[in-house]
Amino acid sequence: IAALAGSILALPATAQTYSNCNPLTQGGCPPDSALGRQVSIDFTSGASDSFTAQGNPTYDSNGASFTVSKSGDSPQLTSKWYIMFGKVEVVLKAAPGAGIVSSFVMQSDTLDEIDWEWLGATSDQVQSNYFGKGQTTTYNRGAFHSDPGSQTAFKTYTIDWTADQIVWQIDGTTVRALTAQAAESGQYPQTPMQVKVGAWSGGDSANPQGTIQWAQGPTDYSQGPFTMQVKSMTVTDYSTGTQYVYNGNSGNWQDITAVGGTVNSGGSSNVDTAAPSITSSANGQPIPFEGTHAEPSSVWVTPSVYPWVPYATTLTTQAVTYSNYPGLPSGWTVSDSGKVVPPSSAPVSLPPRFTILIACSIAAGLARVWLF
């Protein structure tokens, strides 16, 4: 049994968008660690302790590199803190390659999301997108914008997010503005978000045909490796405090409390919202609810609506580490996932009966194991 259970760690796993604790459907979710200020991060100086790395990003004079060289590669960085409305500026160069997707994503525990995504097969275009509460029932939220030179030169990509509007900018020029009123009903992103950057292969043969087609695949790994580079990042949290707490399960920003601070709607961000005509709409085609949130994890939740996009990768276990954070009470810490942990918390081990169940399932030749 021990040998069979151990083999679980070597098996390919399906990992997709998930939330360890979704306040819309679960009670007692821990608070989110708040950034509560502005930070500037220079990745040319090496790794930042503001982020948790997965898939082994590397660092040099060009910043952080996210390389996809084989099936299953999905390197990414995820912030340890959340922002509650704010502005994120990332200086990056997208990866080339048919089927390769470079992503700059903001995502919340309730699966609110704001995206920039680049398809490696199209060097002169970038896609903007948003999701509310993980709903993918319509496909008219994505848009494409002219972006020549995205794979050959570093550019600054900005998301400015307030209670009233989302603005996407390239090198300081607004290419899209979305007001809360114009968003799909009930789906305007408005809950605390982490920042994620990384690359993955949407054109991998293990993905559904719809995903491969969207990513303009298939991916030919013999033409790689394919590398996305992020030079620097500046993040401004429009709200203040040390933690963001959900009150109830409405998913509305008015029900978020900032511990030791204030939730600011960001209405005075003074970002230019004048936007040109959108190059083309993504209406009618499935936009994969995935990106840098294709995370290796032993815990996942499959969205109940199409299209959720399974992503084959190698399941790896990482020890959860905890660190102090300015403003936290004595004894409290912050995990690598950005969650505030009280002094009494301890790592949770898998009960023996689950280990036996998994081992028996493998022995019986089952193709999938679902843990509940």
Image (tube, rainbow, N blue to C red):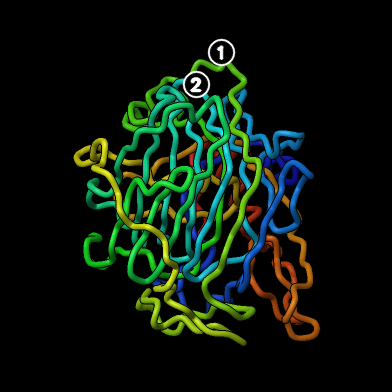
Residue found at the very far top of the displayed protein: 222
What amino acid type should be assigned to the residue bearing mark 1?
A: Gln
Q: Residue at x 42, y 22 (%)?
A: 121
Whether 314 is drawn above or below 271: the answer is: above
Residue found at the very far left of the displayed protein: 284
* Pointers 1 and 2 in contact (C-beta within 8 Å): yes
Measured Cα–Cα span from mark 1 to mark 2: 8 Å
Q: Which of the labelled discs sits on residue 48, or is there none?
A: none
What amino acid type should be assigned to the residue bearing mark 2?
A: Gly
Residue 108 position in % (x across, y down): 48, 63
Quadrant of the drawing holding the N terminus: top right
Q: Which of the labelled discs sits on residue 223, or is there none?
A: 1
Q: Is 136 situated left or right of 358 in this image? A: left
Q: Is 346 situated left or right of 339 in this image? A: right
10 Å crowding of disc 1: few (<14), some (14-19), many (20+): few
Q: Secondary structure at mark 1?
A: helix
Whether 12 is drawn above or below 271: the answer is: above
Residue in front for this viewpoint, 345 or 244: 244
Residue in front for this viewpoint, 370 or 135: 135
Q: Which residue is mark 2?
A: 97
Residue 176 position in % (x across, y down): 32, 49
Residue 29 position in % (x across, y down): 53, 76
Q: Residue at x 45, y 21 (%)?
A: 98
